Amino acid sequence: MDHSDLDQSEIQRICNTAGVHPDLPVCACNPVLGKELAAAVLKGAKTPEDVCAITGVRTGCGIYCMVNVFRVLEACGIELENPQDHRWYKLTLSLKDVPEKKAASIDKMYPQTCMAADWKNYNETRYTAAGVGKEEDHV
């Protein structure tokens, strides 16, 4: 997926909003990068099927990468309605999907999880074009 002709700051913004790193694979079965998902949507993809066809994501299990496809579509303002015969499953797979209050309540019930601290760390970290982390902390 060639993204070189697109506004790189817009790709970065979409990836930040979606919670995917632009330079890391979003799929365990196919090494599609976060920025390639964003580029597919910027180039006209409007559905998960469009994103899959353009990028090659979801060529294996089709489970974990779909969460990232949904996030990128949502970050671009595309709201999806499940088709009648759909096989789309929007699963909660990361701390990004857990509300802060829920993380705190899990921490109270199971303090060994350190869920609230992990949630805070995750949500305070932002992705940068150079890599993961706050810009001033990046080496």
Image (tube, rainbow, N blue to C red):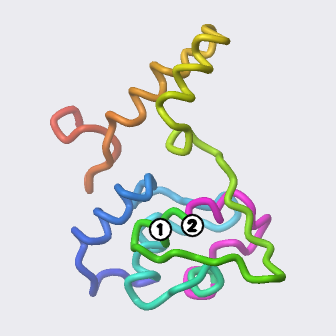
Instruction: Say what secondary structure mark 2 lies in.
Output: helix
Read off the residue under disc 1.
74
Residue 100 in the image, given as x and y percentages of width and height: 47, 31
Residue 41 in the image, given as x and y percentages of width and height: 44, 81
* Position of residue 33 in the picture relative to residue 22 (left or right): right
Q: What amino acid does circle 2 point to?
A: Phe
Q: Which residue is drawn at 69% across and 53% down?
A: 91
Read off the residue under disc 2.
70
Q: Residue at x 51, y 37 (%)?
A: 99
Judge whether 137 appears above or below 126 on screen: above
Alpha carbons under labels 1 and 2: distance apart: 6 Å
Judge whether 124 appears above or below 116 on screen: below
Judge whether 11 appears above or below 115 on screen: below
Q: Contact, CB < 8 Å: mark 1 with mark 2?
A: yes
Question: In terms of image quadrants, where is residue 2?
Answer: bottom left
Question: In terms of image quadrants, where is residue 42?
Answer: bottom left
Q: Residue furthest bottom?
A: 44
Instruction: Say what secondary structure mark 1 lies in.
Output: helix
The number of discs equals: 2
Q: Residue furthest right?
A: 85
Residue segment shown in magenta: 53-69
Q: What amino acid does circle 1 point to?
A: Glu
Q: Which residue is drawn at 15% across and 35% down?
A: 136
Front-most of 85 and 5?
Answer: 85
* Position of residue 124 in the picture relative to residue 80 (left or right): left
Q: Is residue 110 magenta?
A: no
Residue 23 in the image, given as x and y percentages of width and height: 41, 59
Which corner quadrant holds the C terminus?
Answer: top left
